[in-house]
Image: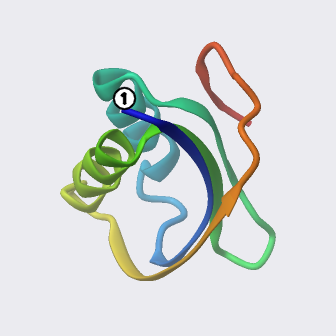
Amino acid sequence: MEKVRKHIIFHGTVQGVGFRYTAYYAAQSVGVTGWVRNLYDGTVEAEAEGTQADIDMMIAAIKRGRFIEIDSMDISEIPLKGDAVFNIR
């Protein structure tokens, strides 16, 4: 399947609830690469590269996080970067 890269801003209860570590382990489990970081406005920003199905599975796993409550996501497609791993920034 063809790889894509998505830039995602997560809104809701996404800081102080283990979001970045949940995203890290979710990405690792499905082979998605990229990164995740907290932003000053209380949102979380991520770039995820993999198949669309793998990115969808990663997001679904994040949504199952115990204290994470995603109200909305801003998602856009961006050029591939070829990251080797998924990092927490």
- Please, what secondary structure does the residue beneath circle 1 have? helix
Q: Is residue 3 left or right of residue 44?
A: left
Q: Amino acid at mark 1?
A: Tyr
The residue nearer to you, when weighing 22 against 34, is 34
Residue annotated with mark 1: 25
Tell me where residue 6 appears, x and y as whole percent.
60, 54
Tell me where residue 84 appears, x and y as whole percent.
64, 13
Tell me where residue 19 appears, x and y as whole percent.
45, 52
For residue 66, above or below residue 49: below
Kindly identify the residue that appears in the image at 74 percent across and 36 percent down: 89
Tell me where residue 56 appears, x and y as whole percent.
31, 53
The residue nearer to you, when weighing 84 against 42, is 84
For residue 28, above or below residue 64: above
Q: Is residue 29 left or right of residue 37?
A: left
Kindly identify the residue that appears in the image at 36 percent across and 32 percent down: 1
Kindly identify the residue that appears in the image at 46 percent across and 30 percent down: 32
Residue most toward the front? 1
